[in-house]
Image (spheres, rainbow, N blue to C red):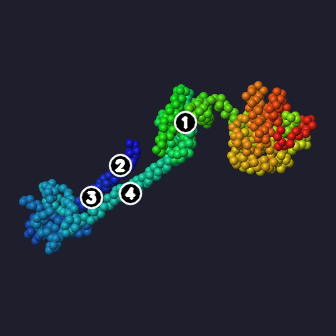
Amino acid sequence: MRRRLRAFWPALAILIGLITGAAFTVQAVRSADEAMRMQWLTEARLMTRALDWAAVATLHADPAIAAMPGYALVKHQMESLRRVGSQYRFAYLLVRGDDGVVRFLVDSEEIGSPDYSPPGMAYAEATPALHALFDQPALMTEGPVEDRWGVWISALVAQPDEAGQTQAVFGVDVDARNWRAALVRAALLPLGATLAFALSAGVLMRVRARIRDEHARLQASEERFYAQAHHDSLTGLPNQRLLADRMQQALSHAHRMEGRAAILFLDLDRFKNVNDSLGHAMGDALLRTVASRLRALVREDDTVARLGGDEFVILLPEIRHDDEPRHVAQKIIDELAKPIPVGGQSVSVGVSIGIALYPDDAFDAAGWLACADRAMYAAKDSGRNTYQFADPLQNARARDRLTIETGLRQGLARGEFLLHYQPVFSLATGLPVGVEALARWRHPEWGWVAPSRFIPVAEDSGLIVALGEWILAEACRAASRWQADAPDLPVMVNVSALQLRRPGFETRLADVLRESGLAPALLELELTESTIMQETLAGSAILQRLAEEGARLAIDDFGTGYSSLAYLRRLVAARLKIDRSFVADMADDPEARAIVASMIGMARALGLKVTAEGVETESQSQLLKVLGCDDAQGYLYSRPLEETDLRAYLARLAFSPASEPGRTA
């Protein structure tokens, strides 16, 4: 209604302005007309004072009076009055006889003129108003009238006698051109103002209309840009930016009202199968249908957003108890379990849901969403198509991982890392056959940080590449230095899958060997079983080229992954290292002992040397000898040592190589 009024009032104002202007114009014309008529009547009354009314009184409306001396005098006066101004066309005297007929007494035209009216001639244009002058003397105008003189107006003055009766009526015809010009001049100002107002109003209306159109266009454009910036183009749902804003509002409201709120992080199960089998167009149609179903399941105040791909988030800004998000999650699981028609087919998808609560799990939007994300992955790990609440311990672990990652970046920049070296001993000779380089981190505030704490974080964050390159270079330099104390003793360095996949690894390895002066045969690269299984055929080619260049390869932590025997058979590895978890239980657990025996037998069949990790007791050492294991490392023989301690230890052993590289025991 207001919008209609805003659109209507300018037109109403213009209409009122036009009506007002027209009224002023009419009033101005009327005023000018009255003023002109009053002027002429005044002039006519002044003219009557120039007449000899005593002579007029002797005249009668009889044609014979034209020969009387008084007639000539009055006629001469009438002719003189007519010539006073060019606007006066005709002057005359009228009388009314006893028969009630108005007749000419004298006129200003010369005798013989075609316009001459002889005395006694009836005045054919006598009107009731003219007759009234004879009954009640007054001033009067008649016209405008058009005849052969053109348009004229008669100014009539009744002249009473001594008895108060009208003796005669003096009339003068005035040219109306002056009158019309005066009327036009009177109308010009208000009419011009009205026209100017109408023109200005029209222009303003047009400008206003264009401004309104431009404003509407800009508003529509702004709304379109806002929608594009804050909504998902595929489903029309709020995107991550709008979700973050609404999450912040929900947090502020819940904090102010001491209330609770929840978010549900959804990830569709097996959505990739739909894209791969039916195509991305069908996948998009499925996402639109899922979005529509999710909107129908929540309240009007709740927010359903799409983060991207097959990930959705539902924000519940107000909850009374923890069962509410649980019920919503279950409804979503049940709804999405129903077949969804896509492209003429019925598709079934599951959904894994993570639930995070405020204030139980987080106090800020980013942490809140991260908690729900981790809970969603926990739901996937639990078998999919279910929901999980955020685990406070999991949150603490995530914060700890972030702290470790930040410390790693700073530690690499500040040089807080150093290497310890643990010798590997031959079970047959008791002499070292190699030294494994182990990374250690001494933080200025935390002290020594366990490798089990920072190595996984380094791998997940990608920092393992920089750390691994530093370890490789430092270990090669150290191995080059200890050759004086232990000739031909190789160094064993762990290499991550990220390092192998990084382009230029072979070039950097060659540069390190050249700069350190270490022979390639004295470097043994250890790759975990899971790393080898992750490598593609291109990765296998890299391992092949490294072996061809002289570097030895070892399979570390064997037994903890999922190795393919056919894949292992094609590898050019020289050593297999049995994980410490199997060695620890082998003395007391027959199954663990059987597994170790099978590993050693398989390695011997593949021509690999076997090293057992984590040997800590003499019984473990003796059992490994019986099973045919080649080498061992662990606290039974030596703990990890700093370089200076290692070199002193090697010097005391009167070192001599126990076995040639590549020889199988």
Disc on the earlier residue, 4 or 2? 2
Query: Mark 3 sits on what residue?
Result: 33
Which mark is in front, 4 or 3?
A: 4
- Three-letter residue code for mark 3: Asp
SS at circle 3: helix
Q: Residues within 10 Å of mark 1 (few under 14, many from 20)?
A: many
Which mark is in front, 1 or 2?
A: 1
Disc on the earlier residue, 4 or 3? 3
Front one among 314 and 162: 314
Q: Quadrant of residue 4?
A: top left
Disc on the earlier residue, 1 or 4? 4
Q: Is 479 on the left or on the right of 566, as rendered?
A: right
- The answer to whether residue 10 is visible is yes
Q: Which mark is residue 12?
A: 2
- Three-letter residue code for mark 2: Leu
Query: Mark 4 sits on what residue?
Result: 199
Alpha carbons under labels 1 and 4: distance apart: 67 Å
Residue 477 in the image: state x and y as whole percent: 84, 44
